[in-house]
C-alpha cells in the first residue's frame, strides 16, 4: 500500500512549482494511475520536485524518486529523501567499485532487485538514468539500471520526460534558485523489445528524452 | 438571520469608511466607469458569440471573450490593491516587475556564470527599487538602477569569470532590468508625488495612467480589427496597422481628455498627457514585439488567458509610466 503524502512534501512541491513556474505538457500520454517508470534528463536538484509536483495528487502518492545513497544518506538530506519523499536510495557506484565482473554484476543485481521490490504491484518510480546532474547542454549516456529494470518489469510503462531550463533556475553547485520559467514535457511511453540489446535500448530511451527538447514551447 | 447579515454589512461599510480612497467620490466614478466598460465589453462579446457563424471569425471572438474575462480579473486585482493604498500598489507592481523579468530572462539566453547576478536582480535590486518608493526616497529611487545597478551588474558578472559573449549578456540583463523594474516602477511612484491641491488623491493619477494606457491598447486593437488595412511595420508586428494606430491613439486621447476632472490637469493638459501616454504605449508594444521577433516567440508567456504573458500586457505601460511620471513631476510638483 502507498503511504499518504508527507505534508512537508506538498509544501516543497508547491514552492518548487512556483519557483520554477513550470509549464507541463503531456505530449505522448495522459497522467494516469498506473504503474510507470518516469525517466528524465537531470540538471538540477529541482528536477525531481518539479516532475513529481506535475503529477496529479493520487498519482503522486504512489510515485517515489530513486536517489543516490552516497549523496542523500546524512542529516537533513536523509530526512528529506527517506521520510518526506519516500525515496528509494540506491548505491550508484556499487558496480564501478567492484573488484571483478562477477562482483559488479552482483552489485547491479542487488540494486535492481531493490528497485523492483520498492515498486511492488502499484508504486511508480522517477529515475534519472544519467546518474548525475549535467549542465543542460547535452544529455549524458544512460546508465544500464534502466535497462535491467525494464527487463525485470517488462509490463511497466517507461515514460520519457524532458525538463527544460531547470539548469538555469538552480544549477549544480548553487543554493539560491532564480525564478525563471521551466518546461516539462512527458513523451510517449516505451517498452523494451524482447530481444533488444542493452546498448540499443539505452540509446533509444535517451533519444526519446532528447526528442522532447523544444516541444515545451507550443 | 437577515438582521444579523444587515448589521454585518453595516459594520463592513463602517470599516471601509476608514479607507481614505473609498471616500474619494471621483475615484469611485473612475471605478464605476471601468465597471461600465467591462459590462459593455462582456455584453458585446456575448452578442458576437451568438451571431458569428464563420470559423475564422469565431476564433477571433473566442479570443476577444477570453481577453474580456481576463480583464475582469485584472481590474479586480488592480482596484483592490489601489484601495489598500500605497503598500498594496507597491506590492502589486513589485510582483508584476518580477513576473515580467522572469518572462524576459527566460527568453534571453543566459549562461551559468550569470546565476548569481540574476539572483541579485530578482532578490535585491528589484525589491529595493520598490522599497525606495515606499520610503519616498526619490533621489535614490531615480538613480539606483541607472547608476548603481548599471555598474554593479557587469562587475558581478565579470567576477564570475565567464567572458563568453560578455558584453551581449550584460547588455541584455541591463535592458531587462531597465524595462521590467525601473520603467514599470514609475507607475506606483506616482503615489509619492506631492502635487499641491491634489493631496491624498494620488491613486486617481495612477488609475488615470493605467486606464488611458490600457484603453489605448484595447482601442488600437479594436480599430485595427475593424478597419485595419495598411500595416505599419509588417516585419515587426503584423497586427499593427495605421488605421488601428490613428484610431486608437485619437480615441484614447479623447477618453483621457474626458477624464480631466479626476486629475490635477486642465482639459488641454489632460489631452496632451493622454496623447503622450497613448503614443508611448504604442512605442512600447512595437519595441517589445521586435524583441519577441528577435528571440523567435509570439508571446512572452501564457499566464493571462488570451493576452499572453505579463510582459505582453505591460509593455505599453513600461514605456508610458516613466515619461508620464516625469512630465507630472516637472510641471506639477514645485
Image: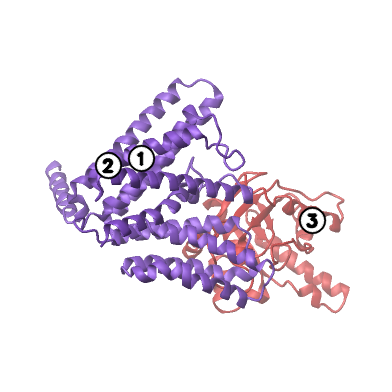
Q: Which residue bears the numbered disc 1?
A: B253
Q: Which color has been applied to chain A in this rendered view?
A: red
Q: Residues within 10 Å of mark 1 (few under 14, many from 20)?
A: many
The Cα atoms of the two marked residues, 1 and 3, are separated by 71 Å
Callout 3: helix, strand or loop? Answer: helix
Instruction: Point out residue B235 in the picture as x, y percentages from the top left corner.
Output: 62, 41
Please tell me whether mark 1 or mark 2 is closer to you in this view: 1
Q: Both on one chain, marks 2 and 3?
A: no
Callout 1: helix, strand or loop? Answer: helix
Task: State which quadrant residue A165 falls in.
Answer: bottom right
Q: Which residue bears the numbered disc 2?
A: B259
Q: Which residue bears the numbered disc 3?
A: A151
Above or below A161: residue B216 = above
Q: Is residue B166 left or right of residue B89?
A: right
Callout 2: helix, strand or loop? Answer: loop
Q: Is residue A79 left or right of residue B35?
A: right
Query: Which of the pair B219/A196 is nearer the observer?
Result: B219
Above or below A46: residue B39 = above
Instruction: Point out residue A33 in the picture as x, y percentages from the top left corner.
Output: 59, 48
The colour scheme used here is by chain
Please tell me whether mark 1 or mark 3 is closer to you in this view: 1
Residue at 27 percent across and 57 percent down: it is B332
Amino acid at each position: 500500500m502507498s503511504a499518504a503524502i508527507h505534508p512537508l512534501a506538498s509544501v516543497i512541491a508547491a514552492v518548487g512549482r512556483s519557483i520554477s513556474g513550470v509549464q507541463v505538457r503531456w505530449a505522448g500520454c495522459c497522467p494516469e494511475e498506473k504503474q510507470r517508470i518516469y525517466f528524465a534528463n537531470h540538471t538540477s536538484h529541482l528536477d525531481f520536485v518539479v516532475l513529481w509536483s506535475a503529477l496529479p495528487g493520487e498519482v503522486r502518492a504512489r510515485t517515489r524518486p530513486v536517489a543516490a545513497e552516497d549523496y542523500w544518506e546524512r542529516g537533513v538530506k536523509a530526512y528529506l529523501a527517506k521520510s518526506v519523499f519516500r525515496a528509494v536510495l540506491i548505491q550508484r557506484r556499487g558496480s564501478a567499485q567492484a573488484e571483478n565482473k562477477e562482483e559488479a554484476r552482483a552489485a547491479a543485481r542487488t540494486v535492481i532487485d531493490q528497485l523492483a521490490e520498492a515498486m511492488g504491484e502499484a508504486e511508480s518510480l522517477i529515475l534519472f538514468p544519467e546518474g548525475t546532474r549535467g549542465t543542460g547542454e547535452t544529455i549524458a549516456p544512460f546508465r544500464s539500471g534502466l535497462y535491467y529494470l525494464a527487463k525485470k518489469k517488462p509490463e511497466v510503462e517507461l515514460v520519457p520526460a524532458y525538463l527544460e531550463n531547470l539548469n538555469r533556475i538552480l544549477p549544480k553547485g548553487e543554493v539560491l534558485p532564480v525564478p525563471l520559467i521551466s518546461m516539462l514535457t512527458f513523451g510517449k511511453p516505451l517498452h523494451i523489445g524482447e530481444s533488444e540489446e542493452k546498448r540499443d535500448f539505452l540509446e533509444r530511451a535517451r533519444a526519446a528524452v532528447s526528442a522532447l527538447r523544444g516541444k515545451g514551447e507550443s | 438571520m437577515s438582521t444579523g447579515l444587515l448589521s454585518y454589512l453595516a459594520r463592513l461599510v463602517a470599516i471601509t469608511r476608514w479607507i481614505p480612497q473609498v471616500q474619494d467620490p471621483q475615484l469611485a466614478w473612475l471605478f464605476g466607469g471601468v465597471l461600465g466598460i467591462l459590462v459593455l465589453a462582456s455584453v458585446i462579446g456575448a452578442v458576437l458569440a451568438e451571431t458569428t457563424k464563420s470559423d475564422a471569425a469565431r476564433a477571433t471572438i473566442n479570443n476577444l471573450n477570453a481577453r474580456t474575462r481576463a480583464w475582469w480579473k485584472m481590474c479586480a486585482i488592480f482596484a483592490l490593491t489601489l484601495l489598500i493604498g500605497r503598500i498594496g500598489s507597491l506590492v502589486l507592481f513589485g510582483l508584476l516587475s518580477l513576473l515580467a523579468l522572469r518572462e524576459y530572462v527566460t527568453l534571453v539566453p543566459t549562461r551559468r556564470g550569470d546565476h548569481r547576478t540574476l539572483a541579485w536582480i530578482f532578490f535585491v535590486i528589484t525589491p529595493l527599487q520598490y522599497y525606495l518608493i515606499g520610503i519616498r526616497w526619490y533621489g535614490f529611487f531615480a538613480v539606483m538602477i541607472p547608476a548603481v545597478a548599471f555598474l554593479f551588474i557587469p562587475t558581478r558578472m565579470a567576477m564570475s569569470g565567464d567572458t563568453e559573449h560578455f558584453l551581449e549578456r550584460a547588455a541584455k540583463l541591463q535592458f531587462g532590468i531597465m524595462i521590467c523594474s525601473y520603467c514599470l516602477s514609475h507607475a506606483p511612484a506616482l503615489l509619492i508625488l506631492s502635487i499641491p491641491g491634489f493631496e491624498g488623491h494620488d491613486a486617481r493619477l495612477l488609475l488615470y495612467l493605467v486606464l488611458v494606457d490600457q484603453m489605448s491598447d484595447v482601442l488600437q486593437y479594436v480599430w485595427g480589427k475593424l478597419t485595419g488595412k495598411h500595416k505599419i511595420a509588417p516585419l515587426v508586428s503584423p497586427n499593427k496597422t495605421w488605421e488601428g494606430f490613428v484610431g486608437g491613439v485619437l480615441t484614447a486621447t479623447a477618453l483621457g481628455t474626458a477624464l480631466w476632472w479626476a486629475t490635477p490637469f486642465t482639459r488641454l493638459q489632460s489631452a496632451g498627457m493622454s496623447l503622450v501616454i497613448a503614443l508611448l504605449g504604442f512605442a512600447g508594444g512595437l519595441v517589445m514585439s521586435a524583441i519577441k521577433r528577435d528571440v523567435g516567440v509570439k508571446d512572452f508567456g501564457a499566464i493571462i488567458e488570451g493576452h499572453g504573458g505579463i510582459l505582453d500586457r505591460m509593455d505599453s505601460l513600461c514605456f508610458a509610466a516613466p515619461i508620464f511620471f516625469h512630465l507630472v513631476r516637472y510641471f506639477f510638483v514645485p
